[in-house]
């Protein structure tokens, strides 16, 4: 019986990371989906309701984005569904890597590249929404100011825009760094060797060298030779 091959630390790192990257977006999307579905199926609120102080990511924010951005709901649903599928694939690949399944490495490389492209598209879409976010956040912050000196609206809008662009840029750089690192580690020679069938060959002694299977004719003299 061949001994169970030892799982390298790199494989454990990639497997656990893929599982985490799959679970966290699933949980966050579970919170976002109800508001998105409710907004897409309901009528836009009255004009005055948009200026009310409230949570930033309630249903009305989706109506605002839809009114100022063309094809907001189709793009949002496409990114959301793609994210859910990639999350499930990441979890499956992560489990496969931890179990050293032969096809897990190949599938993981494809899923990592897909997740990288999807993260770029998602962040680009977020960038297109920043002007709308800037307007909504400013309109909801200004009514909350009470008596006393008032900050100029232009200053508030500038601060909000800077914060949103820094956040979007930071998210994009972080996600790209994570997925590029995962792809590099998964495609490395040492990781590939862990999924090589030859790596499971038994070691007959303590010399640490694997002995290939011998031919059944090896060691016999050819008595009929010239």
Image: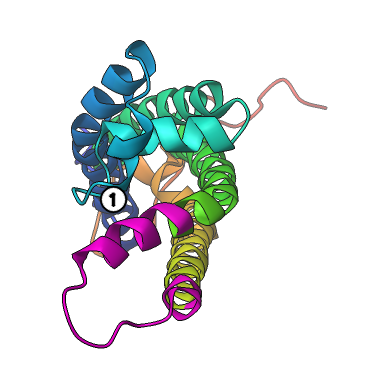
93 w.r.t. 126: above or below: above
Q: Where residue 82 sits: x, y (%)?
A: 46, 27
Q: Residue at x 32, y 28 (%)?
A: 88
Looking at this view, is 216 or 204 the one in front?
204
121 w.r.t. 153: above or below: above
> Circle 1 sits in a helix, a strand or a loop, which is it?
loop
69 w.r.t. 39: above or below: below
Q: Residue at x 29, y 53 (%)?
A: 17
Q: Where residue 144 sits: x, y (%)?
A: 20, 65
| Residue 77 belongs to the span the image colors magenta | no
Residue under label 1: 203
Image quarter hosting the C terminus: top right
Q: Residue furthest right?
A: 226
Looking at this view, is 197 or 159 the one in front?
159
73 w.r.t. 19: above or below: above
Q: Where residue 75 sits: x, y (%)?
A: 55, 27
Quick check: 179 left or right of 8?
Answer: right
Q: Residue at x 53, y 48 (%)?
A: 129
Q: Is residue 214 visible?
A: no
Q: Residue at x 56, y 44 (%)?
A: 125
Q: Residue furthest front?
A: 147
Q: Main secondary structure of the magenta part?
A: helix
* Numbered circles on residues, count: 1
Q: Residue furthest top?
A: 41
Image quarter hosting the N terminus: top left
Quick check: 219 left or right of 16?
Answer: right
Looking at this view, is 113 or 10 the one in front?
113
| Residue 144 belongs to the span the image colors magenta | yes
Q: Is residue 209 visible?
A: yes
Crowd class of label 1 (few under 14; some 14 to 19; many from 20; radius 10 Å): few
Q: What segment carries the magenta color?
A: 135-158
């Amino acid at each position: 019986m061949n001994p169970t091959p030892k799982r390298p630390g790199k494989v454990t790192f990639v497997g656990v990371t893929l599982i985490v990257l799959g679970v966290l977006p699933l949980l966050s999307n579970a919170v976002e989906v109800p508001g998105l579905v409710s907004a897409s199926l309901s009528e836009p609120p009255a004009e005055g309701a948009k200026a009310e102080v409230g949570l930033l990511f309630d249903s009305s924010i989706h109506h605002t984005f839809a009114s100022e951005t063309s094809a907001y709901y189709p793009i949002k649903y496409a990114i959301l569904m793609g994210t859910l599928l990639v999350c499930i694939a990441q979890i499956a690949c992560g489990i496969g890597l931890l179990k050293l399944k032969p096809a897990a490495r190949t599938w993981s490389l494809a899923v990592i590249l897909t997740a990288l492209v999807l993260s770029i598209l998602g962040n680009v879409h977020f960038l297109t929404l920043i002007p709308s976010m800037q307007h909504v956040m400013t309109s909801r912050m200004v009514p909350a100011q009470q008596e006393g000196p008032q900050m100029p609206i232009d200053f508030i809008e500038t601060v909000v825009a800077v914060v949103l662009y820094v956040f979007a840029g930071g998210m994009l750089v972080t996600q790209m760094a994570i997925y590029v690192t995962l792809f590099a580690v998964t495609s490395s020679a040492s990781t590939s060797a862990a999924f090589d069938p030859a790596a499971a060959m038994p070691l007959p002694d303590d010399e640490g060298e694997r002995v290939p299977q011998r031919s059944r004719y090896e060691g016999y003299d050819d008595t009929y030779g010239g």
